[in-house]
Image (cartoon, coloured by chain):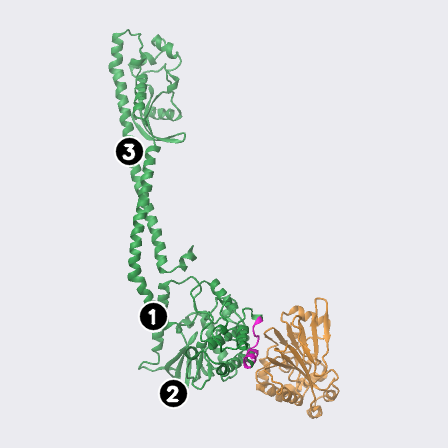
Chain colours: A orange, B green
Amino acid sequence: MRLAVFADIHGNQEALEAFITDVSMRRIDRYMCLGDIVGYGANPNECIELVRSLPRANVILGNHDAAALWMTSPYSMTQDATEAILWTMEQLTPDNANFLKNLNPTIKMGNMLFSHANPYNPMAWRYVVDRKYAARTFSRTGEKLLFVGHSHEPLMITRNNFFKISFRTPGENAVADVDNAKRQIVNCGSVGQPRDRNPKASYLIYDTREDKFEFYRLAYNYRKTADKISAAGLPRFLSSRLSKGI
Amino acid sequence: MKNYLEKVNLRAKFFVWSMIIILAFGLVASILYYSHLKKILMAEAFNKSEMVLQEVEAIRDYVKEILRPRMYELHSKEAFILEAMSTTYVSLNIMKSFEGRMPGYLYRRVSQNPHNSENRADEFEEEMSDWFEADRNRTFWQGVVKKGSESFFVSMIPDYHEKGCLHCHGSPKDAPPSLIAKYGPVGGFRFVEGDLAGLNSVSIPVSRPLALVTKVSVGIFIGTVFMMALLLFVLNLLFGNLVISRLTNIMGILTKETDDTGPAAGTDHLPGSQDELDHLKESFGDLTRYVSLARKGSGPEPNFIGPYAVEAPLIAGTLSWLYKARNTVNREKVSIKIPFEDTMLNPLYAACWQTEMKVLEKTDRHANLIAVIAREGDTLIAEAVDGQDMGTIIDRQAPYRGKELLPLFHQLCDLLAHLHNMGIVHHDLRPQNFMFSGDGLIKLVDLGFASWREIPDAIFESGISPQGDFRYMAPEQMAGKRGDSRSDIYTLGVLLYQMCTGRLPFEKTRSALKTRLRIKENFKPPGAYSEEISKEMEAVILKAMAGDPEKRYQWAEDLMADLEQS
């Protein structure tokens, strides 16, 4: 079974369309979107509709999605993010807003657990990028594979043994073997706003028959996206960061 | 013991209970006989002892009234011939000789103050002396006395001093010298007229007659039991031929007809609660339900649910019927799922029905899943389906060749992937839950025991025993766990097995849970049935049917991919 895992689209329609075009050539059985479809970007409704059109897709609630619904406070984020969220709230159609409202913060499928930021206490929106939160995540969950997003940087965290947790940043278009004996936390990176100094959209495919993770980076027309953001009146930084990958 | 009793069949139940009744009967009869006989024997023993006692009294009277005065006449007043003048001596010696001839009778003549210390009263006799002295009208006593370890029938008569006795029992000064020389001046004197002289008693030991009675009672018990066992055996034969074999015939017919049509159809009851008559009752229940429900929509009176006219029944699911129906407003053909009465009466099944309705309404459309149009109260209005249930089709057309399998299984695996992706696990994927239309389209029409991750799982929360058809059930489900998506994959494996070989890996048996669990581990690999099944196909089936869920296919898509390759 080939599962495409992607996250953090943030209203970036161009990146999402590039993703969909690319992934449709890769024989995907199921899709898993780890949240943050809206926020920062200029096309929240289009992105939601595109994600909903994916066949056999599951979607998870992200912190920007929750903020856009007033589930959590939009003022707890950076100033640019807050402004983008407040703008997004006005754009969302009732149907799309309703779709977001019914999303779950975590989904369990087989021996995998999916969440936006951290699987235990998902509404805390922690970045699982260091040893402390990785160890906490491992100890408070039972599933073998944990998929997260939120940090906008692809990452593979493996629990080697009780004392050692190893971190590995996969290269562009890398293929990593799934370790059958060890638990792993896998971060698929961001489709719409990568922050690892690589402007290409990031996603991963998990192949259960081959036992492999396939990490992909996609080039897309970020200039077009940046122009749309500026045209919408959103903060300048949100458009200028796309080309730098920050 | 109770469990054992429930497990055996009707004949054995009848036999066991009859044996218990016979034994009880024999016991009661022998107890009654024993007590009756004991009473009779006691009366006889008392009678005999009284007779002997009165005989001795007669002897003593003779000594007192005839012999002693005559002795005084012949010899001097001072003479004392013990052997002719002491009633005690005479009676004791006569009785000793008597005892020699008739063993079993014990004569005692005792006093609290005897001449001869051998004749002193014991503790019980002292008590009896007091009792007699308390009321001069008490002249006779009978009873059972326990002396040491033995019990005796005892008859007792008191003896009072008269004037004539005081010659030897009054003041020692007046007594004959030879008496004093023999026994001394201490014992046996200083009585006055009217004092209690002593007690005469005859005792018969109890154990002898009682032993006899016990022996006879036991004999009667054994005899009764034997005779009744014989009677029972004969009656059993008669009953067996006249009644049981005919019942079994009726049952055979009924269970064949009604197997898959009752509520929670295919739910096999867990071990040990059924004998033939219970099964018969159930089958009758199923049959009447079938008849009464099937009349809905096929009688002259039309049945309406909202604007929909209910027509003929299509198939019975786990919790509901699927009927053909027609929308009277726009003439559209539809189908209706109507829950069984039993479903709505049982709160657990009613909850399962609510789940089924929610799942069918909210699930994204899929070609192989029946599509819901509307909901009228507790019934569902769905798209029209036609064809027959897949179970019947498979029975007719199996075994399938590899090429014919693929389109069928493609539909099944795709549907399963669709459901599992949404977090829906079916738990009961029997072929009877699918409708197979003429153009090869499979439609899942029943999700009675399904669970959905979005809503609470009634069956899991209730902790009820495994629900569904044991032949298709995954081993972890049979062991009592609710199961997950991999249990569905196991069932798919069983379906594959059935389609390839034309038979099921396990047949329905009415055996204990433990045997059934072991059966799930041992089944003939499909290759054993047919040469046509390739090694790869066999490997797919065996992996799908692995006992350990971790070793099975984890995803329906993987099963399909391997199937396509084989």
Which of the numbered marks, if any, corresponds to residue B43?
A: 3
Element type at marker 3? helix
- Front of the two marks 1 and 3: 1
Which of the numbered marks, if any, corresponds to residue B328?
A: 2
- Residues indicated by labels 1 and 3 sit on the same polypeptide chain: yes
Q: Farthest residue to the top: give it.
A: B76
Q: In which quarter of the view is residue B453 placed?
A: bottom right
Q: Residue B35 location in percent, x, y?
A: 31, 40
In the image, what residue type sits under mark 2? Thr
What's the magenta region? B551-564
Q: Tell me, yes or no, if residue B332 can be seen here.
A: yes
In the image, what residue type sits under mark 3? Ala
Which chain is disc 1 placed on?
B
Mark 1–mark 3 Cα distance, whole angstroms, equals: 66 Å
Q: Tell me, yes or no, if residue B451 can be seen here.
A: no
Residue on which the image places disc 1: B253
Residue ID at (48%, 81%): B401
How many residues crowd around disc 3 within 10 Å: few (fewer than 14), some, or many (20 or more)? few
Q: Say which of B298 and B219 sits in front.
A: B219
